[in-house]
Image: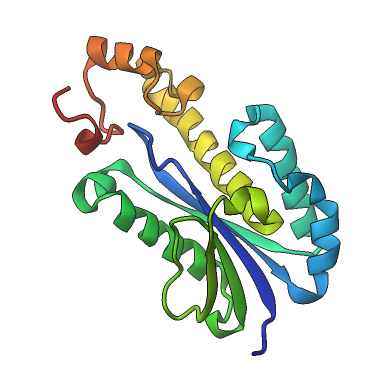
Amino acid sequence: MNITHIVGIDEAGRGSLAGPVCVGVVAVPVEKEEDVRTMFKRLKGRDSKRWSESKREKWFEKIRDTKCRNMLVYGSALVGSSMVDESGIVTSINTALGRALRKMGLDPSCCDVRLDGGLFAPRTYLYQETIVKGDERDIIIGMASIVAKVTRDRKMRRLARLYPMYAFDTHKGYGTEKHYGAIGKNGLCPEHRRTFLVGR
């Protein structure tokens, strides 16, 4: 087994009522793995999705800086609400996951892939493991979680400028009281997942 990269994968936006789902991928060369894990050791045992937006942004910048130092590569892919409605959330996540991995340009046979619980890489990735609460248990999955969440949050802030009546920049499309109130007042916009809002 000639493994060249350890790859972490996670998603963001699965349960949102609006906006895309996003999959983040972080790949660390095996010779850099120990150094990267040491640099990001504070991610172990933590759920970054519970952090403040500013804190996630700071960690994302650290990931980007580490990439600039040629110690890792990362990428992400978004799949929009129309596909979620047409094909379902699982297929949409799998599509985003495949796209994100293809962006990395890595040889699937040389990757040791670790995925957060419920996710699976394409079968061409022979060495893969799905880990329950992987974003808390594995640092590289935790980094991928930050990439996914920050990328999606930035997209939702852009959508908030197009549809200011829904305040997507505050709740990021999730089912908060404020969001349901905005839907009640304004109806649905093109970014809403209609299959998640049957009867509204």
* Horizontal and vertical percent position of residue 39: 84, 53
Image position of 64 with respect to 1: above or below: above
* Horizontal and vertical percent position of residue 116: 53, 55
Of 161 and 37, the residue lying toward us: 37
Residue at (25, 34) in percent of width and height: 196
Residue 197 falls in image quadrant: top left
* Horizontal and vertical percent position of residue 36: 80, 60
Residue at (34, 32) in percent of width and height: 18
**What is the number of callouts on the image?**
0
Which residue is the extreme one toward the bottom? 1
Residue at (49, 23) in percent of width and height: 169
Of 127 and 69, the residue lying toward us: 127
Residue at (74, 73) in percent of width and height: 29
Which residue is the extreme one toward the left? 199
* Horizontal and vertical percent position of residue 1: 64, 90
Image position of 149 with respect to 95: above or below: above
**Residue 189 visible within the image:** yes
**Residue 143 visible within the image:** no
For the C terminus, which image quadrant?
top left
